[in-house]
Image (tube, helix red, strand yellow):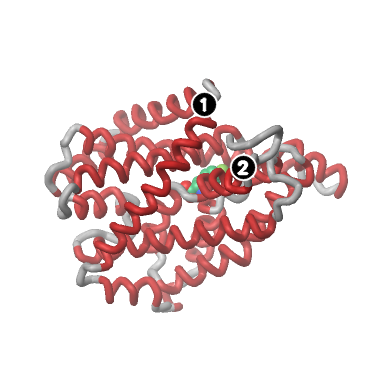
Amino acid sequence: MIRGKGAWRTRFGFYVVAIGSACGLGNLWRFPYVLGENGGGAFVLLYVLIAFVLGAPLLIGELILGKSTRQAVIPATKELERKSSLPLRWAGRLAVLMSVVVLSYYSVIAGWVIHFIVQFALGLFSTKESIADGLSVLMGSGGLQWALTSVHLLIVLIVVGKGVQEGLERWISSIMPLFAILVCVLVYRSLSLPSTPDVLRFLFYPDFSKLTLQSLIHAVGHVLFTLSVGFGTMVTFGSYMREEDHAPTAGFRVAVVDTVVSLGVGLLVFPIAFQASNTPLTDPGLLFEVLPKFLLEIPGGVIFGLVFFVSLYLAALNASIGLFEA
Ligand code: PFF
């Protein structure tokens, strides 16, 4: 990691890693279909509200816990238990357990990304039908998903085992600006589609009758997942913060960037999904179906697809390493 003796060498080092952990499959793959399931605009408002009323304060709390104890989550919560006489060590253990559960599910989706990289690299995605076929083969084959998940976990193990995270993080921080530019170009293209007015109404016109108790549960769950809160990783990142760094400002900025990225992804995915009127907005395959098909319509789409899915994989790998280390 970009740290000196027990501390981030620069403030930038903290942001690269914390934002790298927060922005991942949660923003690009999970957010669009959770939003689709919960009916759009009103859910966006609820999500942003919970991100700043609950998510950001918890994120800041984790950073402060790490910064003040200079420990990872289990020893940090033990120390807190000694001081407060509340049974807080269980919170630390639960966070680690949650990391294991989430890593196992995250790895399945990272495996899907590997499948897409291979398909684009081998030129097998050349028509919309080939993408639909590739996706249905993947969804229909437990064995293939099992193998891809194992490949991902093996890559995580190799990176962690060889201790090459520093190199990986440097690589990721140089490739992410490219990824951000690519996403911006795609958002621009996507927003030029005729479906855009309907999408803007869907995303930003709140119809509160669509909200249910389930929406609230989804919003809280998604906020914790996307901000990487409750897993102990932010405690670890806080433990490497320099004395002069201000944890509340840092935590707030991470929450802002993560939320802006998710909303940007909404503006990328939904115009394309609305355009292809037969695409269900609630499908977990949303990102994997609408985006590749759209890419084939633009010049150099296969290269765009390859770069997009390689960058997405690096983001997923970075987040998986954070979870694995916790
Ligand atoms: N926040 C990540 C995402 O949105 O993809 C997922 C994640 C990474 C959760 C690391 C928890 C964590 F510790």
x 42%, y 63%: residue: 263
Q: Amino acid at mark 1?
A: Val
Relative vertical location of residue 70 with respect to residue 254 in this rendering, above or below:
above
Answer yes or no: is residue 106 visible: no
State the residue lying farthest toward the front.
Answer: 10
Secondary structure beneath label 1: loop
Relative depth, front residue between 307 and 90: 307
x 63%, y 36%: residue: 3
Q: How far apart are labels 1 and 2 at the CA level?
A: 18 Å
Q: Position of residue 178 (x, y in %)?
A: 37, 47
Q: Which mark is residue 152?
A: none
Give the residue number, with chain letter if any, for mark 2: 233
The N terminus sits in image quarter? top right
Relative depth, front residue between 242 and 23: 242
1 vs 2, front mark: 1
x 71%, y 41%: residue: 239
Residue 83 in the figure: left or right of residue 22: right
Q: Position of residue 52 (x, y in %)?
A: 59, 65
Relative vertical location of residue 277 with respect to residue 96 in this rendering, above or below:
below
* Number of disc labels: 2
Secondary structure beneath label 2: helix
Relative depth, front residue between 53 and 86: 53
Q: Position of residue 204 (x, y in %)?
A: 40, 75
Relative vertical location of residue 174 with respect to residue 188 in this rendering, above or below:
above
x 32%, y 54%: residue: 283
Q: Which of the marked residues, 1 or 2, is nearer the chain's N terminus?
A: 1
The C terminus sits in image quarter? top right
**Residue 205 position by quadrant:** bottom left
Give the residue number, with chain letter if any, for mark 1: 164
**Residue 43 position by quadrant:** bottom left
Indicate if the residue with disc 1 has its beta carbon within 8 Å of ligand 1. Answer: no
Answer yes or no: is residue 237 visible: yes
